[in-house]
Image (cartoon, rainbow, N blue to C red):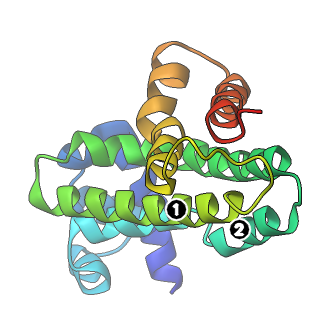
Amino acid sequence: MATRQRIVAAAMPLFVRDGYVETTMAGIARAAGVAVQTLYLSFGSKAAVLEAALASVSDDQPNEWLAHVRAEPDGPAALRRYVDQAAQQVERRFPLDAALRAAAADPEPAELLERSRQAELAVHAQAVDELAEKPGFTTRISLQRATEIVATVLSHETYGLLVGTHGWPAQDWTDWVTRHLEADLFPE
């Protein structure tokens, strides 16, 4: 287990700095101080190393987030709690997600990206289901549409444009997300 963690810790800055394509298994092994054979035995592929790196910076407690949403009786307050948690996750994962998106022409990263998007969409759908039980939740859009809106404004792509490209502070992005989701999900 310590070897896997050391490999993941060594791989993360390589993926962020050099990108997925330019990061080699030999480079990861060298940075981790292990043999290339050990790397292949531990992970099997470079995509598996990236997947483990993404998992290491992800909050593996989305059910805890959903419990907080469920417990909060006020809809907008529950939404703010959810956005705060999801935004922290996006901020932590963004550098590795950017490397993953840049490599999506390659079949293995493309599959990993799709699995990652589907997992995020499922968590957002659960949050929307919880929020829909709160007083004041909109009846103007379907739960599916509400989930798509949440997934879009809380996406790594939106974060990257506003924070990365335009230089917004992360808290400004989080506040913007919250305002827009409140307007769409709790309009009155």
User: In the figure, residue 177 lies in which quadrant?
Assistant: top right
Asked whether 184 or 116 is in front, the reply is 184
The residue wearing badge 2 is: 66
164 versus 69 height, above or below: above
Residue, disc 1? 125
Q: Is residue 68 above or below residue 187?
A: below
Q: Is residue 49 left or right of residue 52?
A: left
Residue shown at the point (21%, 57%) measured from the top left: 109
For label 1, the crowd category at 10 Å Cα-Cα, with few meaning under 14, some 14 to 19 and many 20 or more, is many
Residue 170, percent from left and from top: 66, 29
Residue 159 percent location from the top left of the image: 51, 31
Q: Position of residue 30 (x, y in %)?
A: 32, 61
Q: Residue at x 61, y 64 (%)?
A: 129
- Taking the view exactly as shown, the residue that stands out farthest to the front is 139
Q: Amino acid at mark 1?
A: Ala
Q: CA distance from mark 1 to mark 2?
A: 11 Å
Q: Is residue 162 above or below residue 92?
A: above
Residue 51 placement, left or right of 107? right
Residue 57 in view in this figure? no
Mark 1 / mark 2, whichever is N-terminal: 2
Q: Which quarter of the image is occupied by the C terminus?
A: top right
Q: Please, what is the three-letter code of the amino acid marked with disc 2?
A: Leu
Q: Is residue 91 left or right of residue 36?
A: right
Please rate how many residues cluster around mark 2, counting C-alpha atoms within 10 Å: few if below 14, some from 14 to 19, many from 20: many
Foreground of the two, 45 or 66 = 66
Query: Closer to us: mark 1 or mark 2?
Result: 1
Query: Of the numbered discs in the image, which one, if any, rests on residue 42?
Result: none
Position in image of residue 157 (x %, y %): 41, 34
